[in-house]
Image (spheres, rainbow, N blue to C red):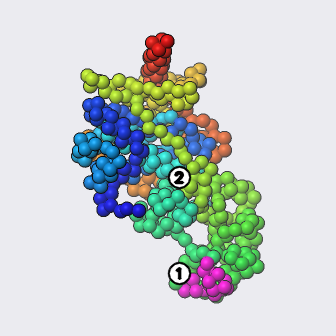
Amino acid sequence: MYRYEDDSLMLHNDLYQINMAESYWNDGIHERNAVFDLYFRNMPFGSGYAVFNGLKRMIQFIENFHFSDSDIEYLQSIGYKNDFLKYLKNLKFTGNIRAMQEGELCFGNEPLLRVEAPLIQAQLIETILLNIVNFHTLITTKASRIRQVAPQDTLMEFGTRRAQEIDAAVWGARAAYIGGFDSTSNVRAGKLFDIPVSGTHAHALVQTYGDEYKAFKIYAERHKNCVFLVDTFHTLKSGVPTAIKVAKELGDSINFIGIRLDSGDIAYLSKKARRMLDDAGFKDAKIIASNDLDEQTITSLKAQGAKVDSWGVGTKLITGYDQPALGAVYKLVAVENNEGEYVDRIKLSNNAEKVTTPGKKKVYRIINTKTGKAEGDYITLEHENPNKEKPLKMFHPVHTYKMKHVKHFEAVDLHHSIFENGKLVYDLPSEKETQDYLKQSLSQLWEENKRYLNPQEYPVDLSTSCWNNKQKRILEVTEHVKEMEEDND
């Protein structure tokens, strides 16, 4: 593999983005402003909510938006012409980006972020924005779901060795922390993002010495806080008894935190181990469980009365195991015409869920001021202010007979200005602040929206003007297609 000292992320791109960019440039429309929405259609994991994430990495990319010399040389080698490449070499991002903040609750078919930029720039950032948001949002959502079924327990992210490569492990650890996990086993993620790290030892330590007693004692010589992995040979006949023996012998010279179970019948073993620890006087010792855990497994173990205090979750978290793709899309919703005025654009499809919502829009969360709970999210055209509409009419965008009128509410704009005219104007909160923000946001949802099985659907509605505009554009395109059909007969 070739290495380039000046390598950038600009070629972390689908080829068709560069092809379209060249077409816009050649046609002279590349500097026309355009508006794109980034959103997903279906709720991941069958969840009642998702959690937006990825803004930090997106900011890093946009701040370093430029084609390097080696990028240009490579594009030249695969056939792009010098006049177009000369333009790309000097290209900088000059547009505007508005987005939800990290840790914001989000739902299907609402813009997570909006890009308003010269057409060529907006097109060239599509692939990497989707790559970032799809992964970060997916893992953060999965982590939050696990937190919901273990609200008081310690959760540790153990997924590095099973992640899809190095970056997924590091950024996945950050996503898990934002989603509600207490720590990560990834030391580099701890360094980069100031995330608490946690970990003990592997089976290899015991196997190396061939004896649990010797291995535990040698480990304790250099580690004050001790959690012993007890299932290398036989959990109940050797592992737990040896951990107790070493803890008693070493006394106050160590902090005997507890034991870890990584295989077998966790429900049965944890109950037996709990009794053994209690009988030995270690009632405060914790039992940590790992071994392909997720929200379903943890819920099942709790229902079986498992005596587990902490959970180490790896593979099924870091890979989004039961739904490894969020499916976010990036769609053009408006573009300038020859007069510099925005013209709304729509994409139609035989699949109703793939019909886009045209126009430059805002997304509001409607908070009932009496209950403190969210009534739903409300998508408007740019000029609308729902705080001036009281009562507010909210209706289902497809089944329009489903409606309600909300009198006592506050409409909160969910988008923040991130970049203005290419300049970063947003102060990114710390990871801990983002985690705390998610906790606060979740308190605004009803429990029915948060349950991990068969949650109540959360409303995402269009304003009347936004809905009417969509129907108008559908009719316009339908008439256009009809005219084309007649011309071709």
Q: Determine whether, in the image, residue 316 is placed left or right of residue 263.
A: left
Q: Is residue 63 above or below residue 343?
A: below
Magenta range = 204-221
The picture places residue 297, in percent across and down from the top left corner, at 68, 56
Which three-letter amino acid code belongs to the residue tagged 1?
Answer: His
Q: Main secondary structure of the magenta part?
A: helix
Q: Residues within 10 Å of mark 1 (few under 14, many from 20)?
A: some
| Alpha-carbon span between mark 1 and mark 2 | 32 Å
Residue 370 is at least partly visible in this image: no
Tell me the quarter of the picture where residue 334 sits: top left
Residue lying at 30% horizontally and 55% vertically, measured from the top left: 70
Q: Amino acid at mark 2?
A: Ile
The quarter in which the N terminus is drawn is bottom left
Dot 1 or dot 2, earlier in sequence: 2
Q: Position of residue 126 (x, y in %)?
A: 40, 42
Name the residue: 47% across, 39% down.
329
Q: Position of residue 366 (x, y in %)?
A: 48, 33
Residue 486 is inside the magenta segment: no
For residue 305, the mark is none
For numbered disc 2, what is the local secondary structure? helix
Read off the residue under disc 1.
Answer: 223
Residue that badge 2 annotates:
139
Question: Which residue is found at the position 49% from the left and 66% from the top?
Answer: 186
Determine if the magenta segment contains residue 219: yes
Res. 402 visible in picture: yes
